[in-house]
């Protein structure tokens, strides 16, 4: 191998590592997330139904937003974050500089986003060299959720939650029945939890009856007799001040789960007010911890 090519590859890796370090500094200053997305985490959010082999495609490098297994090794621009990538990265770069043909990378596509299954170093080198397109063997995972191009992980989460809310409201007519349009969550999958709560509430109401109440009656009863009393207590006690990045509906789900745990431990007669009291005591931050946090000392 030409010594000049080897030296150029070493320099190119150092430049790429420096760029990754610079990106981390920008993240610290701006609080923007420069992490490469995890395919498995996005897959859990989008819940694809099936896979389709698309074969060979030419894919824009900028459309590749994550990795299946190496998302901690590269930043969101695919610059290398760790020195242990040096040997493999330089070998790929040498191939690039000598116009050596490499096999196509393998990608997963989901909702318009591409994730590397095999070929992370090849994507990183191509990105560092200003290559715009790359040959890839693509498997598509079909999802009902459509993601806006160039979305980061936080934006994807918001889009997934918005989709779940839209489906929940459309299928249950929850807003029309309760006149409540702000059943909002900060994490995905919570509307399924609410639906289970409503179904369980309906089951208990139906037990002593000789007829089954309608879904609409169950939703309204759950909203008035289960959800609203807990929300009223959250507002009355101003518990939200301890959870500024969460929603009241988040707290509802947590309190119900906490209450169920207490009933399993202390008996089914453990009442709601006592559960909320215990929940509130457990979530208050001690004064000494606040002081330590201010001076950035971990206990």
Image: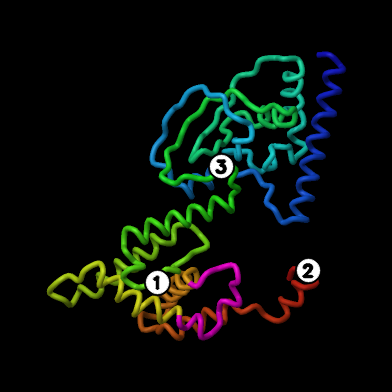
Colour scheme of the rendered structure = rainbow
Q: Quadrant of the C terminus?
A: bottom right
| Residue 73 pos. (x, y %) | 69, 40
Q: Residue at x 74, y 72 (%)?
A: 293
Give SS at disc 1. loop
Q: CA distance from mark 2 to mark 3?
A: 38 Å
Tell me if 195 is positioned left or right of 153 in this view: left
Q: Quote the CA–CA distance across marks 2 and 1.
A: 41 Å
Q: Choose the circle earlier in sequence order: 2 or 1.
A: 1
Query: Of all residues shown, which one is farthest toward the left?
Result: 210
Residue drawn where x is 78% and y is 56% of the image = 29
In the image, which residues are magenta?
Answer: 232-248
Label 2 belongs to which residue? 296
Q: Which mark is residue 149?
A: 3
Task: Judge from the rendering whether residue 244 lies leftward or rightward of residue 226; answer left or right.
Answer: right
Q: Are marks 2 and 1 in contact (CB under 8 Å)?
A: no
Mark whose residue sits in front, 2 or 1: 1
Query: Is 11 colored magenta in this rendering?
Result: no
Q: In this rendering, is residue 45 above or below 112?
A: below
Q: Which residue is mark 1?
A: 180
Crowding at dot 3, Cα within 10 Å, few <14 / some 14-19 / many 20+, comes out as few
Q: Is 52 in front, or is 296?
A: 52
User: For the residue carrying disc 1, how many other residues have a C-alpha within 10 Å: few (<14), some (14-19), or many (20+)?
Assistant: few
Kindly report the distance in space between the C-alpha atoms of the residues bearing marks 1 and 3.
32 Å
Q: Give the mark, 2 or 3, whose residue is nearer the N terminus.
A: 3
Q: Residues within 10 Å of mark 2 (few under 14, many from 20)?
A: few
Query: Helix or strand or loop: what does disc 2 sit on?
Result: loop
């Amino acid at each position: 191998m030409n010594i000049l090519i080897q030296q150029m590859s070493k320099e190119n890796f150092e430049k790429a590592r420096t760029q990754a370090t610079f990106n981390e500094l920008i993240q610290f200053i701006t609080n923007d997330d420069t992490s490469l997305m995890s395919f498995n985490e996005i897959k859990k959010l989008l819940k694809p139904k099936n896979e389709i082999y698309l074969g060979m495609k030419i894919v824009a490098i900028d459309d590749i937003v994550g990795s299946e297994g190496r998302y901690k090794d590269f930043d969101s621009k695919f610059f290398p974050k760790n020195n242990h990538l040096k040997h493999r990265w330089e070998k790929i770069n040498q191939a690039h500089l000598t116009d050596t043909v490499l096999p196509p990378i393998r990608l997963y596509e989901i909702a318009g986003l591409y994730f590397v299954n095999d070929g992370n170093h090849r994507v990183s080198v191509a990105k560092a060299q200003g290559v715009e397109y790359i040959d890839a063997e693509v498997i598509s995972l079909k999802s009902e959720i459509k993601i806006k191009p160039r979305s980061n992980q936080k934006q994807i989460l918001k889009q997934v939650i918005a989709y779940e809310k839209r489906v929940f409201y459309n299928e249950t007519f929850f807003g029309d029945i309760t006149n409540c349009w702000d059943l909002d969550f900060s994490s995905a999958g919570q509307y399924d939890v609410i639906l289970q709560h409503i179904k369980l509430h309906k089951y208990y109401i139906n037990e002593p009856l000789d007829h089954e109440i309608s879904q609409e009656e169950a939703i309204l009863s759950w909203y008035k007799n289960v959800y609203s009393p807990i929300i009223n207590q959250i507002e009355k006690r101003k518990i939200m001040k301890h959870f500024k990045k969460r929603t009241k509906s988040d707290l509802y789900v947590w309190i119900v789960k906490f209450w169920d745990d207490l009933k399993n431990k202390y008996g089914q007669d453990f009442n709601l007010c006592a559960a909320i009291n215990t929940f509130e005591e457990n979530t208050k931050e001690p004064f000494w911890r606040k002081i330590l946090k201010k001076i950035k000392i971990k206990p």
